[in-house]
Image (cartoon, rainbow, N blue to C red):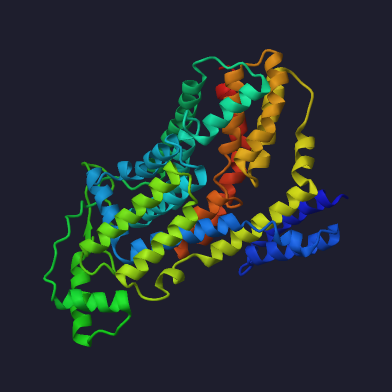
Amino acid sequence: MTMAVLSIIVLVALFVATLRPGFDLGLAALSAAFILGLAAGVPANEVTGFFPADFFVLIVGVTALFAAAKLNGTLDWLLDLLLRLVGGRLLLVALVPFIVGAVLTAVGTLPAAATAIVAPIALGLAARYGISPLLAAVLGVTGIISGLLSPLAVYGVTARELSTKLGIDLPGTAPMTFLLGGLLTGLAVCAACLLIGSRTGAIPTGRAPTPTPPTEPAPDSPATQSARNTELHGTSPDPQDATHVSGTTSSAESTASSGSSGSATVVTTVPAATGTAGAAGSRKARVLTVLCLLAVVSLSVGFDMNVGYLGLTAAMILQLVLGLKPGAIVSMIPWGVVLLIGGLLTYVGLMQHLGAFKEISELLQVEGSTALSLLVLCYIAGVTSFAASSIAVFVTAMPLLPPLVASGLSPVGGVLALALASVLVDINPLGITGGLILGAAAPSARPRLFRQLLTYGIISIFVAPLLAWLAFAWW
């Protein structure tokens, strides 16, 4: 048995072990990488080199920024604003992550950066309005995939440049055809999610109560001063003030049900629009936080700057200017998710080093017709992308297309099928996408969401390449 095969067996064993309560997969993956590295003769410092430092900065930076936005009340205010824009219709609320993700990637945002922005929105809406976290995550990432093949997006640009370099003759309409293919795929998945969600209750029916804009209390209001001292600075309020604040908060929460006649009743608890640390709608906090969010998006999209470092910088600015409680932001960073995904990606990096994914690809290679060869290539891309960088897999698999095109395969269809087969399996907990989704979820929801993402990802390995091949091989 080769070390590559052994690494695959160990990975399967690690996932089986998660069925045991209390088993920490992140710690186990790091330990397995170290032990397997010793057995394979890979030095420990080389194994450490597989740790995804870029992922660490990305998830810590982005979650720190959104933690600051949550602490000062801006995130709740933004979610209320989104609810008002869609008139409280919960079906449209569920569509918000899809639309935001599609727009971000269509204008050139890198997939990881787009996911870092979309995941907190999707999971925040899910937590507030009773939408399934898995469904919200799938809709958000599907939106991101929908825009990935636009003429400005990374996959669209890479597909055209690689095709030219490899001698694949694309028609002049190829850029728009790529965009159309991605959009149609995303809309099809989105429609299926909405249909299943509305039938199973994953998306509640009816409307959520539309929040009213917050009113500004007097600057010397006891509720305002007490909340600000408690949440922003960590000082203990007077017990009488604390009682007053509690009553104010309770009265700000509303529970309502609405919807057309005959629809199921929706009960939705809407937090105060002002959030927690924002102290009854601090306009200064909201304006500064929104400016920081816009700056992070603009600099990451327009200037290709690292969104993780941008998030860390913005979070530090908010902490200093607004005087947020020391340690409050750091305590809200999902360190368990960082360990989980960091450990898994370290182990996956060692697997790649040992040639495990090459072994899997060789097992899938069969002789057949041009169309069947493309199907096998799509499955190779899907299986490999499950635990590796999708764009790297796409770039690696593209050189295998020219012989198939020379044999009569549609060049546009071949590129589309291969690209989509490699990205449709991204919604799984083995990659950065899954890590960002888990990091944005409520701590109590993470264990179940991890299992759901893993199940979804495994199923997508078998289904996504086949559907991409059926839909686009003939284009």
Which residue shows up at 41% across the image and 34% down it? 191
Please tell me how many numbered marks the rendered image carries: 0
Q: Is residue 139 above or below residue 238?
A: above
**What is the residue that sits farthest to the bottom in this orientation?**
239
Which residue shows up at 48% across the image and 49% down it? 305
Question: Horizontally, is 22 left or right of 59 in the view?
Answer: right
**Residue 418 x, y percent position in the rendering:** 62, 29
Question: Horizontally, is 230 left or right of 415 in the view?
Answer: left
Quadrant of the drawing holding the C terminus = top right
Q: Is residue 4 above or below residue 398?
A: below
**What is the residue that sits farthest to the top in this orientation?**
408
> Residue 391: in sight, yes or no?
yes
> Residue 449: in sight, yes or no?
no
**Residue 259 x, y percent position in the rendering:** 23, 45
Image quadrant where residue 55 sits: bottom right
Image quadrant where residue 22 sits: bottom right
Q: Which is nearer the eye, 460 or 196?
A: 460
Which residue shows up at 13% across the image and 68% down it? 217
Image quadrant where residue 368 sits: top right
Q: Which is nearer the eye, 91 or 290?
A: 290
**Residue 166 x, y percent position in the rendering:** 67, 23
Q: Is residue 225 above or below residue 301?
A: below
**What is the residue that sits farthest to the front in this orientation?**
303
**Residue 174 x, y percent position in the rendering:** 52, 19
Which residue shows up at 47% across the image and 26% down it? 179
**What is the residue that sits farthest to the left in this orientation?**
218
